[in-house]
Amino acid sequence: MKHGAPTLSVSLHQLRLFVTLARHRSFTRAGDEFGITQSAVSRGIRELEDEIALRLFDRTTRQVALTDTGRKLLARIAPLVEELEAALRPRAQAFGEPGVVNLASSCALTASVLPAMLASCRERLPDIAVVVLDRPQNAVLQLVRSGEAELGVVIAPDKLDELVAEPLFADGLAAVVSASHRLSVAAHIDWQQLRGTPLLLLDDDTGSLGTIESALALHGVTGAVRQKFTQSAAVARMAEAGLGVGILPMHARAACDSARARFIPLVPDTSRTIMLVRRKSRALRASAAHVWSHVIASASHTLVSGQAVEA
């Protein structure tokens, strides 16, 4: 009597853990998404690897990375997990709550760009409620890719895989100095003038740090002490106190306006693009499609380089 191949016993939960860990590259963050401990995530992944007799991740004390086998499996498993969840939770995943749209926004943009955008949506689309998920930039991209948020507002990311992006406006960078600083009366500040100056920056969860560091390197700004903060307001308040020169996106001026601080454009101009993103593989529900179209159409009325403009 011939015996078939051993039967695999793999659960949807294990597959979801695999996809989530592959996305976060962190046991802690994957556990946070599931509401479980990092050790529980590690145990679930280890049981999955034992069951299928494949090593899916390389683990070190500092990082988690997919193996070549893991990458190949992820490409096949992720769409299947998504389809299964959509089939098992049709109300939450496929239809959503009528008239409610989940929009994720990078923390750096929520206090500056989003208020005018949401006010415009409420005026033109009064029957649609936009629920804001205020998160760090990387988390915003993950929420959109997973379908938990239908739309996202971000600073142009390095990778747009799985996403459709629509540019809204370009946003430059500014030096933020106290009103008593020697450069406070300048019309603009050259990047090279920052050499040797203590710098106050946003951290890498805001989507700005890479651009700023590249510009500093390009213009030879070396030897400066760099302090990093999670919020634009913290950078502005530190600059007000004379503790250094802040570097912030121009749009942050709307949330950090103060008589004791000056936002002065940095030259040569280094601009990033503020984008509206959605998932490539799924059509938007009607309410989300209306918000998508309205935000794009009204982008010319949104804050551009910190100033409201008329179309």
Image (spheres, rainbow, N blue to C red):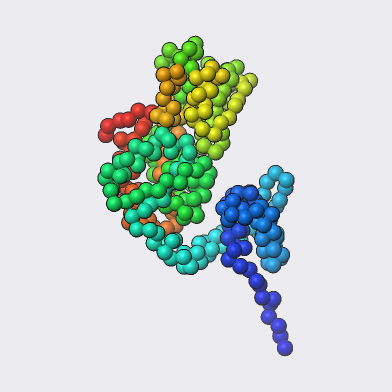
In the depicted structure, whether residue 216 falls above or below residue 311: above
Residue appearing at x 46%, y 65% in the figure? 89
Q: Quadrant of residue 78?
A: bottom right
In the image shown, does 233 or 263 lie closer to the viewer? 233
- Tell me where residue 155 appears, x and y as whole percent: 46, 38
Residue visible at 53% across and 23% down in the picture: 238
52 vs 230: above or below: below
Q: x and y percent of residue 231 in the render? A: 51, 32
**Residue 139, above or below 305:** below
Left or right: 294 as drawn, with respect to 10: left
Return the residue nearer the eye: 181 or 67: 181
Q: Quadrant of the C terminus?
A: top left
Query: Which of the 4 image quadrants contains residue 201?
Result: top right
Question: Picture coordinates of residue 273 (x, y %)?
Answer: 43, 36
The residue drawn where x is 50% and y is 24% is 237
What residue is rendered at 69% in x and 54% in y? 39
| Residue found at the very far bottom of the displayed protein | 1
Quadrant where the image shows the N terminus: bottom right
Q: Tell me where residue 93 sits by quadrant.
A: bottom left
Q: Is residue 20 visible?
A: no
Q: Is residue 102 left or right of residue 33?
A: left
The answer to whether residue 50 shows anywhere in this view is yes
Q: How many badges with numbers are in the image? A: 0
Q: Position of residue 286 (x, y in %)?
A: 33, 56
